[in-house]
Amino acid sequence: MSRLLEVEDLQVSFKTYGGEVKAVRGVDFYLNQGEVLAVVGESGCGKSVTAQSIMGLLPKKVSRIKGGSVTFEGEEILGLPKKQMQAIKGSKIGLISQDPMTSLNPTMMVGKQIAEVIKKHTDIAKNQIKVRVIELLAMVGLPNPEQRYSQYPHELSGGMRQRVLIAMAISCDPQLIIADEPTTALDVTIQAQILDLLKDLQKSLDTSIMIITHDLGVVAEVAQRVAVMYAGVIVESGTVEEIFENPDHPYTWGLLNSIPKYGSGEKDRLIPIQGSPPDLFAPPTGCPFAARCEYAMEICVQEMPDKKRTSETHHARCWLNDPRAPLVKDLISAGRAE
Ligand code: SF4
């Protein structure tokens, strides 16, 4: 599989009245051609800021990219001039945002909004654009696509509006779709339909998808690889099997313990992760999860653990993976954790 997107040591800060918020602190991950990668973590962990950095959508006045690199098809795209980035957005990278109501123009017919994108980024003949839009609306499963073309966003349900956004994102055959919490605003049955649609489109169009979510259920449903993000850092990454069956980081263990399991009974209570994420005005020098981690050792608060590789595809940043660390069962029997 060839590498489509590579993010290395990305660092992004925001200027606020209270000082500098270090929202993304050295993020690394990659996405191969035709692959679905899920970036998962709690709100505020920096996953959407990472996506906005890739798309060049950070608010210029208050944000600053402090370092790192983002290569797309082998070319550096971080900090590209607006015009060059505009050419990539839409034609090569499509975006599906979490709130279709604010992403669509309420005063314009949805078909016309998709037509605008096609006009801007492709050389399809003018008289063919409407035909293409109707084809796209049908592809994303909207009934009566000819009629939908002339409707306004408020005339459609939340699920339908999300389908319109997906049609817009795929309208120029992008190599990469970034889907930022695409199902968060939808009810459960519609969520499942949208995820099925994304999976079908990924296969039929052979595109790559980077899906951003806080929901491990979404990850299990659509992704092949997962990057777990916490306090602006990727703390673990691996294939879906590696992350769900053999996770290597206490934060990932916590996330997995806090979701219901199929067939679990009343006695199997969900265990929430206690505490809250660190203050990113003054992030800790050591492991960002240390204050919430029941296995924390002295070294954890002093030094950020390096990335340790347990397979070609599986990495975690945790001192427990250091060969000198005690086994978790030793820490438990020593009364450090119960
Ligand atoms: Fe817990 Fe230490 Fe691992 Fe951080 S490095 S997750 S504090 S054991």
Image: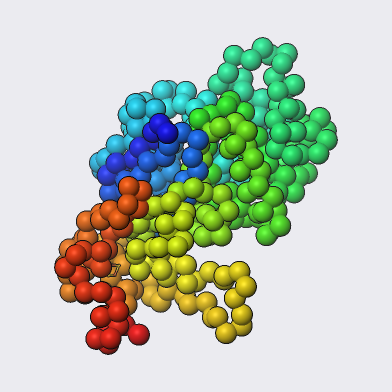
Q: Position of residue 273 (x, y in %)?
A: 42, 73
The residue at 72%/44% (across/down) is 160
Q: How many dots with numbers? A: 0
- Image quarter where the N terminus lies is top left
283 is higher (above) or lower (below) than 153: below
In the image, 265: left or right of 30? right
The residue at 70%/37% (across/down) is 140
Q: Position of residue 201 (x, y in %)?
A: 62, 37
The residue at 42%/70% (across/down) is 254
85 is higher (above) or lower (below) than 242: above
14 is higher (above) or lower (below) than 149: below
* Nearer-the-camera pick, 313 or 316: 313
Question: From where the camera sits, is residue 12 visible?
Answer: no
2 is higher (above) or lower (below) than 210: above
The residue at 41%/68% (across/down) is 253
Task: Assign ligand 1 to one image quadrant.
Answer: bottom left
Q: Position of residue 138 (x, y in %)?
A: 75, 33
- Quadrant for residue 185, please give it: bottom right
Question: From where the camera sits, is residue 299 visible?
Answer: yes
Q: Position of residue 111 (x, y in %)?
A: 72, 30
- Image quarter where the C terminus lies is bottom left
